[in-house]
Image: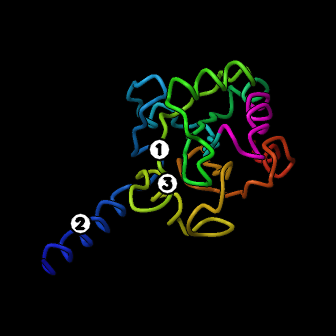
Amino acid sequence: MKNVLSFLLLFNILIMNAQNSIYDFNITTIDGKTMSLSSFKGKKMLLVNTASECGFTPQYQELQELHQNYGEQLVIIGFPANNFGGQEPGTNSDIKSFCQKNYGVTFLMSQKVSVKGENVDPIFKWLNNQENQSFKGNIMWNFEKYFIDEKGQLFKRFRSTTKPNSSSITSLI
């Protein structure tokens, strides 16, 4: 058993090191379609873990405004997650409907994922272990933001309290 665990740990480290940029990942959209993030090469990206029943949920509106104002330069992807206080209990269909009805969301949304813990999505495992960020480690709450540069590298990370339309973010676009 010890050898198997050692092998799995080594395999996990090798896999994590194999991803050199965000472009090495695929996502499944909220509609169930597989999409390669390499299709966004040369564009800046803002990846956000989201939730429908959170105090920060109104940030969906600001994310939508960013998408409308900077959609040519910036790809926004929302990653619904139920890791914090059960604040994203719905299905993918429920989440999509909520976002469209309440905030007019048209930016890209991933299927519901886990952003921390044992079943963390590989993208968030990679993001949280990148050296080039203002802080490193696990996500603390919903609506944390990861700003990716045109080369597919994490450029900066923002906590939930940083609003999407803040100059801290818009100045990077």
Q: Give the alpha-carbon distance from disc 2 to disc 1, as whole Å.
A: 22 Å
Q: Secondary structure at mark 2?
A: helix
Position of 10 compared to 169: left or right? left
Which residue is labeled 2 in the image?
11
Q: Nearer the viewer, mark 1 or mark 3?
A: 1
* Callout 3–callout 2 Cβ contact below 8 Å: no
Q: Which mark is residue 41?
A: none
Toward the right, the furthest residue is 167
Q: Nearer the viewer, mark 2 or mark 1?
A: 1
Position of 128 compared to 60: left or right? left
Image quarter where the N terminus lies is bottom left
The spot of residue 39 in percent (x, y) is 46, 31
Q: Amino acid at mark 3?
A: Phe
Which residue is labeled 3 in the image?
124
Image quarter where the C terminus lies is top right
* Crowding at mark 3 (Cα within 10 Å: few <14, some 14-19, many 20+): many
* Callout 1–callout 3 Cβ contact below 8 Å: yes
Toward the viewer: 33 or 87? 87
Query: For residue 154, which quarter of the picture?
Result: bottom right
Q: Secondary structure at mark 3?
A: helix
At 60% from the left edge and 44% from the top edge, which residue is drawn?
A: 47
Q: Amino acid at mark 2?
A: Phe
- Which region is colored magenta? 52-66
Which residue is labeled 1 in the image?
113
Query: For residue 138, which quarter of the picture?
Result: bottom right
Q: Is residue 97 above or below residue 49?
A: above
